[in-house]
Each structure stands twice: as C-alpha cells, then as structure tokens.
Image (cartoon, rainbow, N blue to C red):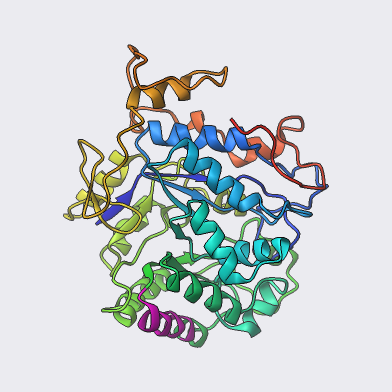
C-alpha cells in the first residue's frame, strides 16, 4: 500500500465561481478571502521539502481579474526554489481559466505550464461526468467534455494526471457507472491516469446542502455506499487504472483500513495543509504523519511503501527514487533547514552549518502549518483585495 509525503498549497480561496458543493471559495471582496503572496507560497514549499516532501500539490480558487501569467509564475517560482520537487498542480478547471485569462488554447496553456515546471496534474473538478448532474450542483463549472479535453490533451503532452469522482449528492448508481466508464475509455486511449480517487461529498458546510434547494440532495454517501463504490471501482477499472486511492481527509484513517480491504491500495499523501475538505466540514484533520500512515497499513497486515507521485518507490533512508529520476542533490538538507528556520529571507548555501536537530515530519506538531480557519479569520494578513493581479514578493 503506497503513500506519498507531500504538501498541499491552496494559495487563494478567492473565486469567480460559486459551486454548490464548495465551502472553500469566497468572492474577491469577501472579508474571508485570502491570497498568499509568492514568497509565502515558496516558503511553504521549502518547508515541505525540508520535512521530506517529494511532492508539492497546488490548487486554488479562480481569482477575479487574475494576471494572465499567474499560474506559470507560481510554477516557475516553485521550481526555481525547490527544483528537485515533483510539482502536481492545477486542475482542469484552473487550466481552462488560465487559458481564458491568457488567451491561449488549452494545449498552449498546458504546454506553458509544463515548460514552467508542472510535472503532473490533479484530475479534480470532475465531480460526476454527466452534464445533467453538473448543472444542478455546479452550473458554472466546466463541462464533462471540457474536462475530458483537458485531461486527454495533458496526457498527449506527457503530463500524467490523477482521476477523481465526487459522489453522495444527487447522482444515482447509473451516473457513477457512466463516470467510471468514461474514465476507463480515456485510459484506453491515453494511458495517462496514475490513480482513481473516489471522493465522498462532505455536506456539513456545503451551500447546496445547507440551502436545501435541490431535490433529492443527500448529505453524503453512507458507509456501505463508500465500501461498495471502492470495491466496484477496483473491479471496473482493473487492468486499466491499477491504483485506487482512499481519501483519508474525507473517510478518516480508521475507515480507510476497511477500504484498503475493499480494493484500495493507496492512502494518498501527508498533505500538511488541507483546506477544501476542511472548509466543507471534514473532521479528520489536515496532516497524516508518515508513521501514522505506515501504522494504518501495517495494522491490517499490509506492507506500506513510500512512493512518488507517479508510483515509483522512494528509499526511506535516502529519499532517492527507485525507478524514477533521482532527486537533485545540489540543495542540501542543511540549506532546506536554514531556509525554513530563518525569517529574514536569507537562503543559506549548501556549505552553511546547521547544528540544530533536523526535525522529521513525524516529529512536528500539526499547529506548525496553520489552518484554513486561521487564514479566513485573520483580517489583516494576506487579504484578497477584490481585484487580483499577481502575488507580490518573489523571494
């Protein structure tokens, strides 16, 4: 059973769209809208790497009046700061928004992101790939055909993606089956999916559930439905998409053990920060430490392994990737730790000495990483000012 040490960076919740299931986004002028400047985005990535992350995952809202080059600038800044990291960034929804803002085609936008340093894309914003369902829960969202177009274009350019499905709202088993069939058909054409991740609808703070305006709206799937969905996905996608991931932020580590015995073979990532499920009301936290993930797997008699984003193996001692390009060695652990510890913006060279104990992710407290609720409660730092042009302060 695999897991990846990664850090999520949801750099803004300012968004031009109002999706019924999303409790994360805010309008550009909302007092709870935040926007992290570039130096903070980079700082979080450096901190993640200093704690053993091999992946940085970047997803966010769609800020109004966004600078046309924002996404490529973020990717370039991250790759310049931590060139050895695998950058898993920008959903199909963000790709289309970036293409519109920069007046590029989808292919040209994806090419620009790849050139800027994006390695793979999260296959989120899929929800249910049926436009009659999408119209009910997120009428402003990209269409099913647009999602497929972005994904297949990414695959054609050598950018692999994950695949997802959000269920437990107004869809029926028919819609779930059609969604899985669409994913399988795409995989047969491209071979570009790395995994499939079923995502339970978290309803507690979701506007479409709280407002009660959609007939037949459920408050998320039952436990039995979650088990069946994972088992059916394993059978339906067998030989096509071989990796089936449990979303522990939505299901919790305890229930994840059951799902690992119902077809799943992956526990996802450590995350460090998780804002989207948390905002919707998920209660399982935003950090799963590596030892927690290992214990969760070992307790059911399975063997854990630390993986890369694309399912290569990582040596637990050296962080070197087996079956994938070796992590760059030109940035030392000492440099990462100095970068994480110093507040004056100075980046220590590889020859700087660090005598303090180097903490691992298993040793740090959850409070170190802040939280979504702290971000939206802080009315002074990192406020989105309505018109978003470009984050300031590249360090």
Task: Specify whether residue 186 is painted magenta.
Answer: yes
Q: Position of residue 164 (x, y in %)?
A: 47, 68
Task: Specify whether residue 275 is painted magenta.
Answer: no
Q: Quadrant of residue 360?
A: top left
**What range is drawn magenta here?**
178-191
Q: Is residue 30 left or right of residue 149?
A: right
Q: Residue 51, can we see it?
A: yes
Q: Residue 222, can we see it?
A: no
Q: Quadrant of the N terminus?
A: bottom left
Q: Say above or below: 40 vs 102.
A: above
Camera-nearest residue between 335 and 284:
335
Residue pictured at 42% horizontal, 69% vertical: 226
Q: Position of residue 359 (x, y in %)?
A: 34, 24
Q: Position of residue 307 (x, y in %)?
A: 28, 51
Q: Position of residue 22 (x, y in %)?
A: 65, 60
Q: Quadrant of residue 188?
A: bottom left
Q: Is residue 225 left or right of residue 23?
A: left
Q: Say above or below: 340 vs 324.
A: above
Camera-nearest residue between 161 and 273:
161
Q: Quadrant of residue 204?
A: bottom right
Camera-nearest residue between 159 and 60:
159
């Amino acid at each position: 059973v695999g897991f990846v040490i990664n850090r999520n960076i949801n750099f803004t919740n300012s968004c031009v769209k109002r999706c019924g299931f999303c409790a994360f986004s805010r309008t550009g002028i909302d007092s709870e809208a935040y926007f992290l400047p570039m130096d903070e985005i980079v700082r979080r990535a450096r901190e993640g790497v200093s704690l053993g992350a091999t992946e940085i995952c970047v997803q966010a809202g769609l800020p109004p009046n966004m600078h046309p080059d924002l996404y490529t600038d973020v990717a370039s800044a991250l790759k310049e700061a931590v060139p050895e990291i695998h950058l898993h960034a920008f959903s199909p929804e963000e790709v289309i928004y970036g293409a519109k803002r920069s007046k590029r085609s989808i292919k040209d936008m994806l090419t620009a992101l790849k050139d800027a340093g994006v390695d793979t894309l999260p296959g989120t914003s899929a929800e249910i790939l049926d436009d009659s369902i999408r119209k009910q829960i997120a009428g402003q969202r990209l269409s099913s055909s647009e999602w497929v177009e972005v994904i297949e274009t990414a695959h054609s350019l050598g950018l692999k993606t994950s695949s997802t499905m959000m269920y437990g709202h107004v869809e029926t088993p028919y819609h779930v089956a059609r969604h899985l069939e669409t994913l399988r058909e795409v995989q047969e054409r491209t071979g570009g999916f790395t995994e499939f991740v079923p995502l339970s609808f978290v309803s507690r703070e979701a506007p479409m559930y709280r407002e009660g305006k959609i007939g037949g709206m459920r408050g998320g799937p039952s436990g039995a439905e979650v088990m069946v969905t994972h088992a059916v996905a394993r059978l339906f996608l067998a030989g096509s998409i071989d990796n089936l991931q449990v979303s522990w932020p939505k299901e919790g580590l305890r229930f994840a053990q059951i799902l690992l015995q119902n077809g799943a073979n992956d526990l996802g990532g450590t995350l460090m920060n998780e804002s989207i499920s948390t905002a919707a009301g998920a209660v399982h936290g935003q950090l799963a430490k590596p030892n927690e993930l290992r214990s969760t797997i070992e307790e059911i008699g399975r063997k854990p392994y630390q993986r890369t984003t694309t399912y290569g193996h990582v040596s637990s001692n050296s962080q070197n990737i087996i079956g994938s390009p070796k992590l760059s060695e030109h940035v030392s652990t000492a440099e990462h730790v100095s970068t994480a510890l110093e507040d004056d913006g100075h980046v220590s060279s590889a020859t700087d000495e660090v005598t303090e104990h180097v903490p691992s992710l298993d040793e740090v407290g959850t409070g170190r990483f802040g939280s979504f609720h702290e971000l939206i409660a802080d009315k002074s730092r990192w406020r989105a000012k309505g018109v978003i042009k470009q984050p300031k302060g590249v360090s």
